[in-house]
Image (cartoon, helix red, strand yellow):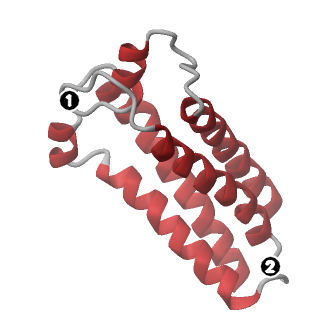
Amino acid sequence: MNMVIASLVCIALLAVSLAHFMWAFNRPWPIRDRKLLAKTVVGFAGVETMPPWYMSLGVAILTFLAAFFVLALADHTGGGPTTTLIGALVGLVFLGRGIVGYLPFWQRLTPEEPFRTNDFRVYSPLCLLVGAGFFALVFMRLA
């Protein structure tokens, strides 16, 4: 069961990483209108452009590393307690982002549509599921 969870989380993280890599290299995917893309994936009030390339590249690299780390976390015999601890910390980051998406202060900071709707329906739930996947694997390692 742990490899099923790890594989699903890995696929989701690789998809997120790929999108951020494309944005880092100035590829407006999946929306060609750059202003609409920014309003869709950034959402801050008055946003007109995507963040600087290095921010997207940073997220791309971190999600890429997390995608492969989750596979390592699925091997309950490898890595020892350090891997388990890092897995819990990564899980907390994703759970935190998922929870923040539903808080009023975040909704005030990111009022742009369609980000607001996407965050409520897709981005935050995905972060919650990824975080839950990390914690499921952490608990499986401890059991």
Judging by the rendered image, the residue that carries numbered circle 1 is: 111
Q: Identify the disc placed on residue 37.
A: none
Q: Is residue 91 left or right of residue 141?
A: left
Q: Secondary structure at mark 2?
A: loop
What residue lies at 51% left-to-right and 10% top-to-bottom? 32
Confirm whether residue 118 shows in the render.
Answer: yes
Image quarter hosting the N terminus: bottom right
- Residue at 83% x, 73% y is 75
* Residue 52 position within the rendered picture, expressed as x and y whole percent measured from the top left: 42, 38
CA gap between label 2 and label 1 equals 42 Å
Left or right position of 36 against 58? left
Q: Which mark is residue 76?
A: 2
Q: Amino acid at mark 1?
A: Pro
For marks 2 and 1, give the one nearer the viewer: 1
Secondary element at tag 1? loop
Decide: is 92 above or below 126: below
Q: Position of residue 5 (x, y in %)?
A: 73, 55
73 sits to left or right of 129: right
Q: Residues within 10 Å of mark 1 (few under 14, many from 20)?
A: some
Which residue type does callout 2 highlight?
His
In terms of depth relative to the viewer, which is nearer, 127 or 35? 35
What is the quadrant of residue 102 in the picture?
top left
The C terminus is located in which quarter?
Answer: bottom right
